[in-house]
Amino acid sequence: MKLIKQIYLIKSAAITWLITITYLSLKPQVEMPINFDHLDKILHLGSYGLATMLITLAYPQTSQYQTAALLFTYSLLIEIAQLFAINRYFEVADLAANLVGILLAVHLIRFIQKTAR
C-alpha cells in the first residue's frame, strides 16, 4: 500500500509540475525580480530538466527517449500557443534551453542508474 501511495505522489507531482509550466508559460509576462542575463533560459532549462526527472520517476516503463521526445513536443506546443497569448512570443532559444534541460536530465538519470548498480 505504501508503494502505491508513493507512485501516486510522484505521478501527482509530475502532472502538477507540467500544469505549472503551462500556466507560467502562457500567463502574461511580468518583469523578473532579478536582473540577470539569460535567467529566462536557465529557468527553462531547470523547469524541463525537473519535468524530465519527475516523468521518468512517475512512468518508469516509458523509455527515456520517448519521455524526451514527448516533453520536447510539449514545449514546442507551448511555444506555438504563446503566439496567441498576451505579451508572449515564440522563441527558438527557449526551445533550445528546454531541449538542453531535457537532455541533461536524461544523462543525469542514466549516470545515477549506472552508478547505483
Image: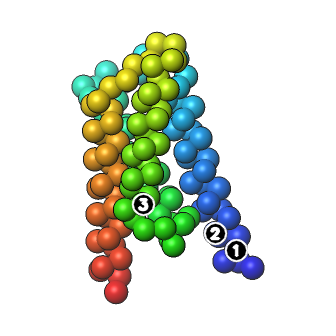
Please say if the residues under marks 2 and 1 sit with CB atoms less than 8 Å apart.
yes
Q: Position of residue 60 (x, y in %)?
A: 50, 71
Residue at image location 57% in from the left, 31% down from the top:
23
Furthest residue to the top? Answer: 87
Pick whichever of labels 1 and 3 is earlier in the sequence.
Answer: 1
The amino acid type, in three-letter code, at marker 3 is Gln
Considering the numbered disc 2 on the image, is that residue within a helix, a strand or a loop?
helix
Residue toward you, 6 or 58? 58
Residue bearing mark 2: 7
Residue bearing mark 3: 66
Determine if residue 39 is in view: no
Q: Position of residue 10 (x, y in %)?
A: 60, 62
Furthest residue to the left? Answer: 37
Q: Quadrant of residue 75?
A: top left
Question: Badge 2: few (under 14), some or many (20 or more) residues near its Cα, within 10 Å?
Answer: some
Residue toward you, 114 or 62? 62
The amino acid type, in three-letter code, at marker 2 is Ile
Residue bearing mark 1: 4
Question: Badge 1: few (under 14), some or many (20 or more) residues near its Cα, within 10 Å?
Answer: few
Residue at image location 37% in from the left, 38% down from the top:
44
Considering the numbered disc 1 on the image, is that residue within a helix, a strand or a loop?
helix
Please say if the residues under marks 1 and 3 sit with CB atoms less than 8 Å apart.
no
Please say if 89 is above or below 111.
above
Q: How is the image coloured?
A: rainbow
Pick whichever of labels 2 and 3 is earlier in the sequence.
Answer: 2
